[in-house]
Image (spheres, grey):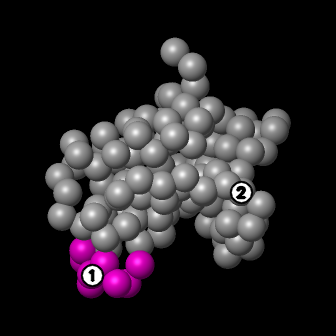
Amino acid sequence: MKKVYRVKSDREFQRVFEEGTSFANRQFVVYTLKKEGQQHFRVGFSVSKKLGNAVRRNHIKRYMRESIYDLSNHIHPAYDLIVIARRDAVNQPLPTLKQNMYHVLRLAQVLKEN
């Protein structure tokens, strides 16, 4: 994803955590913060060290980015998102993670209407 689509700084993460709302399923927790007038959504990813070594965590983050990339045309542009992986996401194949990402984003109501 391009840099303009990322939530990067600690201050931006904290703002989404403090002012946003959270939604969860077994694999992911998503914090959302609506920001009117934003040209595109932004997303940040977090994978705890409890989920494995650096190789495992980067593998999970790659899958999470791929899932968001596939859904990017359907995500409303007025949101900042923070996606946190849970323990159940560790050994899931990519299609299952994509399905669960879609599910949690649908719960968070950040997907555009069809």
- Point out residue 15 in the picture as x, y percentages from the top left corner: 75, 66
What's the CA distance linking mark 2 and mark 1? 28 Å
Asked whether residue 53 is drawn in magenta, I would say yes
Q: Earlier in the sequence, mark 2 or mark 1?
A: 2
Q: Secondary structure at mark 2?
A: loop
- Point out residue 99 in the picture as x, y percentages from the top left corner: 31, 40
Pointer 1 residue: 52
Pointer 2 residue: 20
Q: Is residue 15 visible?
A: yes
The vertical placement of 95 against 76, above or below, is: below
Bin the neighbour count of mark 1 within 10 Å (Cα to Cα): few under 14, some 14-19, many 20 and up: some
Question: What kind of secondary structure does the magenta stretch mostly adopt?
Answer: helix
For the magenta stretch, what is the residue range? Answer: 48-56
Q: Secondary structure at mark 1?
A: loop
Q: Is residue 4 visible?
A: no
Residue found 71% across the figure and 38% down from its top: 78
The three-letter code of the residue at mark 2 reads Gly
| Most foreground residue, 100 or 13 | 100
The three-letter code of the residue at mark 1 reads Gly
In this picture, residue 96 sits left or right of residue 24: left
Dividing the picture into quadrants, the one containing residue 71 is top left
The vertical placement of 46 against 103, above or below, is: below
- Point out residue 110 in the picture as x, y percentages from the top left corner: 59, 37
Residue found 66% across the figure and 35% down from its top: 77
The vertical placement of 3 against 114, above or below, is: below
Residue found 28% across the figure and 64% down from its top: 88
